[in-house]
């Protein structure tokens, strides 16, 4: 098991009441809930950073599509839809 490290922060009374309420509903301590919430937030940010980096890497490899080409294709799709829908 990984070693646990303490984090200390301040939250307002309304936030603490919300944390306490959710933790109680889940059958866990507020500290356990906070630790899980921090982990989920950090994982979400890390996943987003990886997603952005994959796009940057793709562009660096020359795999991007020029803006003008994308807009031309979208304009054609819109025109085709308008023809069908009147």
Image (cartoon, grey):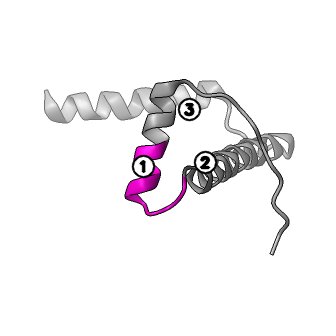
Whole-Å distance between the Cαs marked 1 and 3?
45 Å
**Neighbours of disc 3 within 10 Å: few (<14), some (14-19), many (20+):** few
Identify the mark nearer the N-term, 2 or 3.
2
In the depicted view, which residue is nearer to us: 80 or 62?
62
Asked if 17 appears above or below 58 in the picture, the reply is above
Toward the viewer: 62 or 57?
57
Residue at the image position 50 percent from the left and 26 percent from the top: 13
Above or below, comparing residue 17 to residue 30 in the picture: above
Q: Quadrant of residue 17?
A: top left
Tell me which segment is drawn in magenta.
Answer: 20-29
* Viewer-nearest of discs 2 and 3: 2
Which numbered tag is attached to residue 52? none
- Per the image, the residue denoted by label 1 is 22
Q: Quadrant of residue 55?
A: top right
According to the picture, the residue beneath numbered tag 2 turns out to be 34
Magenta span includes 10: no
Circles 1 and 3: CB atoms closer than 8 Å: no
Q: Which residue is mark 3?
A: 70
Q: Looking at this view, is 72 or 45 the one in front?
A: 45
- Residue under the point 71% across and 32% down: 9
Give the Cα separation between the discs numbered 2 and 3: 43 Å
Q: Is residue 17 above or below residue 14?
A: below
Residue 53 percent coordinates (x, y): 78, 44
| Residue pictured at 52% horizontal, 26% vertical | 71
The residues bearing labels 2 and 1 have C-alpha atoms spaced at a distance of 10 Å
Point out the image quarter for the N terminus: bottom right
The answer to which of 19 and 41 lies nearer the viewer is 19
- Looking at the image, which residue sits at the far left? 86
Magenta portion: prevailing SS class: helix
For the residue labelled by badge 1, is the local secondary structure a helix, a strand or a loop? helix
Q: Is residue 33 left or right of residue 2?
A: left
């Amino acid at each position: 098991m990984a070693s646990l490290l303490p984090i200390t922060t301040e939250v307002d009374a309304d936030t603490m009441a919300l944390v306490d309420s959710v933790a109680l509903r889940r059958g866990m301590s507020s500290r356990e809930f906070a630790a899980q919430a921090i982990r989920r937030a950090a994982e979400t940010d890390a996943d987003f950073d990886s997603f952005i980096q994959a796009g940057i890497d793709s562009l660096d490899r020359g795999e991007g599509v020029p803006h003008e080409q994308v807009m031309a294709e979208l304009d054609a799709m819109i025109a085709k839809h308008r023809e069908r829908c009147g």
